[in-house]
Amino acid sequence: MAEFVFFVLALVTIVGALGTVISRNAYASALWMVAAFLGVSGLFIMLNAPFIAMLQIIVYAGAIAVLIIFVMMLMDRRVLNNKERFNPQYLWGVVLGVGLLADLSALAFKFRINLSHIGENLTLNGSNTKMIGDVLFKRYLFPFEITAIILLIALIGAVVLTRKDINT
Amino acid sequence: MIVYYMIVAVLLFAIGATGVMIRRNFIIVLMSLEIMLNGAGMLLIIMAYYLGNISGQVMFIFVAAVAASETAIGLAIAVMMYKRKGSLDINNFSMLKK
């Protein structure tokens, strides 16, 4: 049963990613991307990470996808859906992508660590959310604060970049 | 079974990298970047599951925050270049070239 669910979710994810890359219409591309994110969030639930799965839906399939679609809404449809989808040298890009895939797959198949108590500690000590909160606010407090500063800088940068009187 | 999850993450990363390399539309390049980051984050979750350690899931929160800020900056650049060039083709974006 778990294998069946996994293969359905993996199929949704991979088809969504491929649709994002090769789709002709940019709006369709964004919707394929949402499908890929939903598939990934299902895989997260199967990996004992329900909190992260909900975060994935809210942040990626919610905020980021809506932001991208909102910006596309501001632009001209004829500019957005250009007739030529791919770069002139797209063949080299595909060759490099397949090479990367082969390399990383070889690494994945060779991966061995001999201490597998698979998924045990993630379910033992009660709620997943509580454990994440414990580790996030005790061990990783400083990176958490740095993340807040990164978000502030991104906010200021986006405002400055889209100002009207920016010249040269 | 864990290898299949890793293969899915690797496929996401490779498809995203291919999209970054072959597409012309800048916004679709940004979407492919999101897919690449999601593949890398999924590998963090897989390792958290495999090692039975919650830290990988915490790392994913940081990856998601960085991905969100990167998308905001990227879309701001897309709007700026659209206002200036009237086009989203990344081959027209080489402004520093003389």
Image: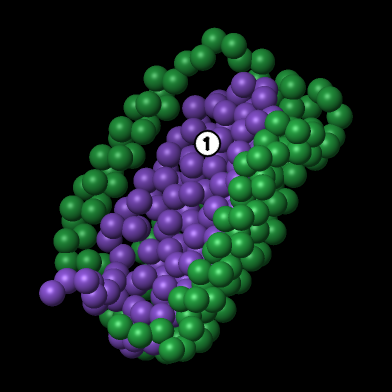
Chain colours: A green, B purple
Instruction: Please count the marks in the image.
Output: 1
Would residue A54 be visible to someone looking at this image?
Answer: yes
**Vertical relation: A44 (above or below) A115:** below
Q: Position of A82 compared to B67: left or right?
A: left
Left or right of A84, for residue A150? right
Residue at the extreme right of the image, as rendered: A126
Tell me the quarter of the image containing the C terminus of chain A.
Answer: bottom left
Residue at left offset 37%, top offset 32%:
A105
Res. A29 visible in picture: no
B20 or A164: nearer the viewer:
A164
Disc 1 residue type (three-letter): Leu
**Residue B48 found in image quarter:** top right
Q: Position of residue B94 (x, y in %)?
A: 23, 72
Q: Is residue B81 left or right of residue A128?
A: left
- Residue neighbourhood size for the residue with mark 1, other residues' Cα within 10 Å, grouped as few (<14), some (14–19), many (≥20): many
In the displayed orientation, state which residue is furthest to the top. A114
Q: In the orientation shown, which residue stands out farthest toward the left?
A: B98
Which residue is located at x 25 percent, y 52 percent? Answer: A94
The front one of A82 and B61 is: B61
Q: Secondary structure at mark 1?
A: helix
Q: Would you name the residue on which mark 1 appears?
A: B43
Please give the chain letter of the residue carrying mark 1. Answer: B
Residue A134: x, y in percent? 79, 34
Q: Tell which of A157 and A22 is nearer to you.
A: A157
Query: Residue visible at 51% across and 63% down?
Result: B71
Q: Is residue A53 above or below residue A47?
A: below
* Residue at (65% x, 64% y) in the render: A62
Residue A54 screen position, x and y as percent = 72, 51
Q: Position of residue A10 (x, y in %)?
A: 54, 44
